[in-house]
Image (spheres, grey):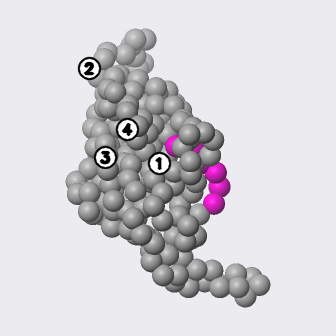
Amino acid sequence: MPTVRSTKPNPDEQIPVALAARIVGIDRSSLAHLIDHGLIPRLDLDTVRALAGSGEVAAKTTDAPSHLVIRMDVDPAVQRIVEMSDDELSRTVEGPHRLPESSAGRAVLLCVRSFVIATGHLDSLGDPIPLRTDRRGREITGRTISVSIYLRLNNLSSRPSKPIENARWLGRRARVGTGGAVLPLQS
């Protein structure tokens, strides 16, 4: 039996995850992860257009020092990010992270699969905690952090209409370098 397909999708229909991921330019598992967390409520044509238009943003030269990008790895089977309160969201990123003492007071971008879902501020750093030793026998330490959340996005397909100051990051993709769990945004 041949499969009948439409050449032009109906705006009210659900778009398959594989096709939507190809249009947006991310891998299928990342898009499925965002759907599982409830950050994308429905994969219709408008949502896919909004995600495709949320290109990478780089830090401006006026953003000094650069933002810290915190990648969140929360299992959607255990807890969905949409259902978390701001306090629960800030507790999930406590750490320990490998950060210098000078990082306190910097602006923070919380990301899920490279999409910025919240902006905040790094309030304080804890005392160094030994994590492991490297091949040369040096001790590698990390610090717990406390983050206060300023702006939050519960739906990636509806970004703020007027991106003012820190709201310009919400729903966009943060381009980061290589390294640990907390990274500076590159320009």
- Residue with the mark numbered 2: 12
Depth check, mark 4 against mark 2: the one in front is 4
Q: Which residue is mark 1?
A: 113
Closer to viewer: mark 1 or mark 4: 4
Secondary structure state at the residue bearing disc 1: loop
Seen in the image, is 153 located left or right of residue 97? left
Q: Are marks 3 and 4 in contact (CB under 8 Å)?
A: no
Q: Which residue is mark 4?
A: 167
Give the residue type at disc 4: Ala
Write the start and end of the magenta stretch as one range.
174-179
What is the C-alpha distance between the residues marked 1 and 4? 18 Å
Please, is residue 101 above or below residue 22 in the view? below
Tag 1 near tag 4, CB within 8 Å: no
Left or right: 176 in relation to 136:
left
Residue at x 46% of width, y 31% of height = 54
Tell me the amino acid under the disc marked 2. Asp
The amino acid marked with disc number 3 is Arg
CA distance separating discs 3 and 4: 9 Å
Tell me the distance, in whole angstroms, between the alpha carbons under discs 1 and 2. Answer: 26 Å
Residue in view at x 70 percent, y 85 percent: 138
The furthest residue to the right = 136
Helix, strand or loop at mark 3: strand
